[in-house]
Image (cartoon, rainbow, N blue to C red):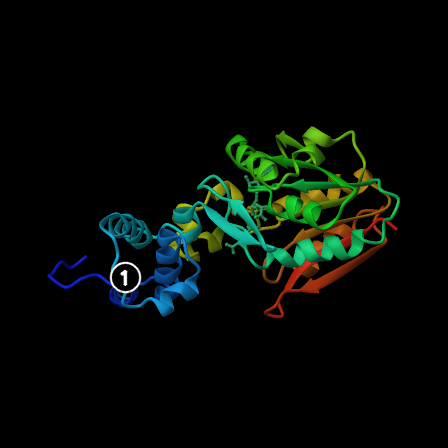
Amino acid sequence: MAENNQIWTIGRILKWTEDYFGQKGVESPRLDAEVLLSHVLGKQRIYLYVHFDEPLQAEELACYRAMIKQRIDRVPVAYILGEKEFMGLTFKVTPDTLVPRPDTEILVQAAVDRLKQWTDGTVRLADIGTGSGAICLSVLSMLDGVTADTVDISPAARAVAEENAATLGLSERVTFHTGDLLTPIREQQFTAILSNPPYIPEADIQELAPEVRCKEPMTALSGGRDGLDFYRRLCDEAPPMLSDDGFMAFEVGIHQAEDVARLAEASPLIVRTEILKDYAGIDRVVVAWRK
Ligand code: SAM
Ligand code: GLN
């Protein structure tokens, strides 16, 4: 950061950072500069706009500089802050967990809309590849009377999900497992089995933004040669674990929905599928019903 005798005010440092991020190829330079600075100051973003002339304290400046350095190294903003907002809740995230994406809110809302119809208080949910726990914990926070099991192959991700459950006051309603897909919960029955599995085709990995390709866990992203490896296993193994009127619902990558619906329909236990779009009009969620 260029040094001179001028005082670093909020307005001046934001402009400087926006330009610097822009030169370094950061995709949303102004937004990132604002989000990081408001975090350092412990204020809402709107505060920055009405305090453009306020000078930064030395410690605030030092802290902000360290964040700028990380962002230039393409560390995602959520990892720098250690948190990400999802479904209006704040989730702790670390480099061991995927940063929850807005698209995944479609899966959560789809599950909530469908689970609302169960009124007998015995709804059981499974979230496979839970990462930060974003999917499962959001559903639980919106629906009373639902309990859940989560599985992740990463013990470090499981620890983050457990911490998020505790922070959200949901620990008593969740059982966490470490293991491979459905293996740890094989003997159980569920009303709904949800998953946002790794689904990026191998050949597309190198096309991902450096923030994703270099900083997010590859075990969270790579879905094998055509990206469908996890859906093949889930569609084969999950249907017998659904209760009679239950469903499974998966987030899918672009152009994958029809293939995944076909994989689900290949199970003799699945009678009907739905495909739901995201905010950009892309097919994003496949729901498959046992009845
Ligand atoms: N559910 C979180 C979300 O939507 O933000 C994380 C989804 S991330 C795309 C996929 C997750 O699946 C990662 O946390 C990864 O560790 C986990 N995973 C990868 N392979 C797995 C396997 N064989 N069994 C269980 N979990 C697995
Ligand atoms: N949506 C993520 C991305 O585009 C991928 C997540 C996944 O593989 N499920 O980076």
Residue at 44% from the left image edge and 42% from the top image edge: 95
Residue kind at label 1, given as amino acid type: Lys
Residue at 36% from the left image edge and 54% from the top image edge: 41
Q: Position of residue 11 (x, y in %)?
A: 28, 67
- What residue does disc 1 label? 24
Residue at 48% from the left image edge and 55% from the top image edge: 204
Q: Position of residue 274 (x, y in %)?
A: 77, 60
Q: Quadrant of the N terminus?
A: bottom left
Taking the image as shown, residue 180 lies to the left or right of residue 264, namely left
Residue 115's place in the image compared with 9, above or below, is: above
Taking the image as shown, residue 212 lies to the left or right of residue 252, namely left
Quadrant of the image occupied by residue 166: top right
Q: Position of residue 244 (x, y in %)?
A: 88, 44
Taking the image as shown, residue 67 lies to the left or right of residue 277, namely left
Q: Would residue 201 be visible to someone looking at this image?
A: no
Q: Would residue 258 be visible to someone looking at this image?
A: yes
Q: Is the residue marked by circle 1 packed among few (<14), some (14-19), or many (20+) residues within 10 Å?
A: some
Residue 232's place in the image compared with 260, above or below, is: above
Ligand 2 within 8 Å of disc 1? The answer is no
Q: Position of residue 215 (x, y in %)?
A: 40, 46
In-front residue for pair 258/159: 159
